[in-house]
């Protein structure tokens, strides 16, 4: 009897394109870790999220939690999922209270999602400070503080008439 070896990548291809249809377990594991991280972000008051928060990052938010090299496998895995979410998601601006102008990812620019502009004033840190009391953009302030390419992106955002929380969304979703 002769043993016939085949590359794992070929076995993981779909049956319709010549493979056997096995699942790539590494990619499947990564998807599950990212899904768990997304659940911790979206349902931060769930029992699981509160237990993990109490154990691994009691004084921080999930997105601000530090990674630990000597931490448990669970902690490192969840941080890996968070990093994947962080690299492919951005903030939808509501009130702007939880989003930093220069630090957070909130512009619909697929490369970085961040404001690419020098920080002119230190007293303006949150997106809410770029809005007027009525909730619309303060056009003069945005033009003063941010480079022109970014200004057009910011001013293209529709501002909601009713205040809502800032939410993290998957940038590549078709139904934003």
Image (spheres, grey):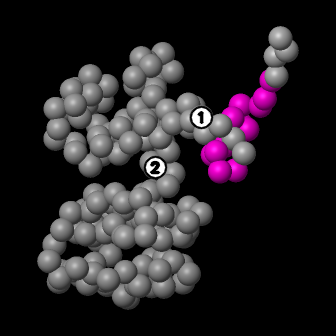
Q: Quick check: is 11 in the magenta stretch? A: yes
Considering only vertical position in the picture, is 63 above or below 77?
below
Name the residue at the right extreme: 2
Which residue bears the numbered disc 1?
22
Q: Secondary structure at mark 2?
A: helix
What segment carries the magenta color?
A: 5-17
Furthest-top residue in view? 1
For the N terminus, the quadrant is top right
Image x and y of residue 76, in percent: 46, 26
Give how far apart the Cα atoms at labels 1 and 2 are: 29 Å
Vertical position of residue 167 compared to residue 129: above or below: above
Relative to 132, 19 lies left or right: right
Q: Which of the 4 image quarters holds residue 118?
A: bottom right
Horizontally, residue 58 falls left or right of residue 85, namely left
Q: Quadrant of residue 128?
A: bottom left
Residue shown at the point (56%, 61%) measured from the top left:
112
Pick out the residue farthest to the bottom.
Answer: 140
User: Which residue is under mark 2?
Assistant: 86
Give me the residue at 49% from left, 55% from top. Answer: 88
Q: Which callout, 1 or 2, points to the residue nearer the camera?
A: 1
Residue 167's tag is none
Q: What residue is at 16 percent from the left and 32 percent from the top?
A: 47
């Amino acid at each position: 009897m002769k043993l016939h070896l085949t590359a794992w990548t070929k076995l993981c291809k779909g049956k319709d394109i010549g493979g056997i249809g096995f699942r790539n377990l590494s990619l499947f594991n990564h998807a599950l870790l990212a899904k768990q991280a997304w659940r911790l972000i979206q349902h931060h008051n769930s029992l699981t999220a509160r237990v993990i928060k109490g154990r691994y990052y009691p004084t921080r938010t999930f997105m601000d939690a530090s990674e630990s090299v000597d931490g448990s496998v669970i902690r490192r895995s969840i941080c890996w999922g968070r990093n994947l979410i962080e690299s492919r998601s951005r903030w939808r601006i509501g009130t702007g209270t939880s989003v930093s102008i220069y630090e957070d990812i909130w512009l619909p620019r697929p490369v970085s999602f961040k404001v690419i502009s020098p920080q002119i004033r230190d007293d303006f840190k949150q997106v809410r400070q770029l809005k007027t009391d009525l909730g619309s953009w303060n056009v003069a302030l945005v033009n003063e503080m941010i480079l022109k390419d970014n200004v057009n992106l910011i001013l293209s955002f529709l501002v909601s008439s009713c205040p809502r929380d800032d939410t993290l969304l998957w940038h590549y979703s078709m139904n934003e």
